[in-house]
């Protein structure tokens, strides 16, 4: 009998939560290089919720796809934050309905008593800053994976 390996796990949609900075780093890693139209950002002040509908690169599948010589994949996912008090952005023209944004990272800047700021850093000097009463984030895949249109994994020069 041998121990199970990562490859033995069944493939399933992601459904992850984050309540601290370490948890959020996992979400940030999996959401890196996600792309989304500016029209897919939603801020609902009465519900204290901010959400993005992302086209997420499936980083968790990259090595398996390369080993098996099959296409890299993306999947639509919702990145949602609850307990949001306010939202601010820079470098984003919300009136440009054709603008496509690329998410580079998601970070938490802790404040007092669990409050703080979530910073979503975008390519091209854009950013979204959420003031939160507490960190409460969710990343959930909502569609089946599809072939990445570029056919390539995102690459970041070192």
Image (tube, helix red, strand yellow):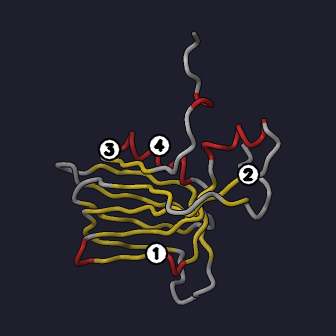
Residue shown at the point (52%, 54%) measured from the top left: 105
Task: Report the residue that reaches farthest toward the right.
Answer: 69
- State the residue position of label 1: 41
Residue 154 lies, with reference to residue 127, above or below; the image says above
Q: Secondary structure at mark 1?
A: strand
Q: Which residue is at the far left?
A: 113
The front one of 95 and 154 is: 154
x 49%, y 66%: residue: 127
**Which label's residue is closer to the chain start, 1 or 2?**
1
Task: State how far apart marks 3 and 4 are (Cα).
Answer: 10 Å
Q: Which residue is mark 3?
A: 20
Q: Which circle's residue, 3 or 2, is located before the other in the chain?
A: 3
**Foreground of the two, 141 or 81:** 141
Which label number is shown at residue 95? Answer: none
Task: Indicate the position of residue 83 as horizontal and vertical percent values.
Answer: 24, 63
Can you identify the residue that label 2 sits on?
A: 72
Q: Residue at x 21, y 49 (%)?
A: 114
Residue 61: give x, y in percent of width and height. Answer: 65, 43
Q: Mark 3: few, some, or many residues within 10 Å (few <14, many ≥20)?
A: some
- Determine the CA span between mark 1 and mark 2: 25 Å
Mark 4–mark 2 Cα distance, whole angstroms, equals 20 Å
């Amino acid at each position: 009998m041998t121990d199970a390996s990562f490859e033995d796990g069944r493939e399933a949609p992601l459904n992850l939560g984050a309540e601290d900075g370490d948890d959020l780093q996992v979400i940030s890693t999996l959401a890196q290089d996600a792309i989304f139209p500016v029209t897919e950002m939603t801020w609902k002040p009465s519900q204290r919720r901010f959400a993005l509908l992302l086209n997420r690169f499936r980083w968790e599948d990259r090595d398996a796809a390369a080993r098996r010589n099959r296409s890299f994949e993306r999947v639509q996912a919702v990145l949602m934050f609850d307990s949001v008090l306010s939202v601010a952005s820079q470098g984003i023209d919300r009136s440009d309905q054709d603008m496509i944004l690329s998410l580079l990272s998601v970070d938490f800047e802790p404040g007092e008593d669990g409050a703080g700021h979530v910073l979503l850093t975008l390519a091209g000097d854009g950013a979204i800053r959420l003031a939160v009463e507490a960190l409460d984030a969710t990343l959930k895949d909502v569609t089946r994976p599809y072939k990445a249109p570029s056919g390539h994994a995102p690459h970041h020069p070192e």
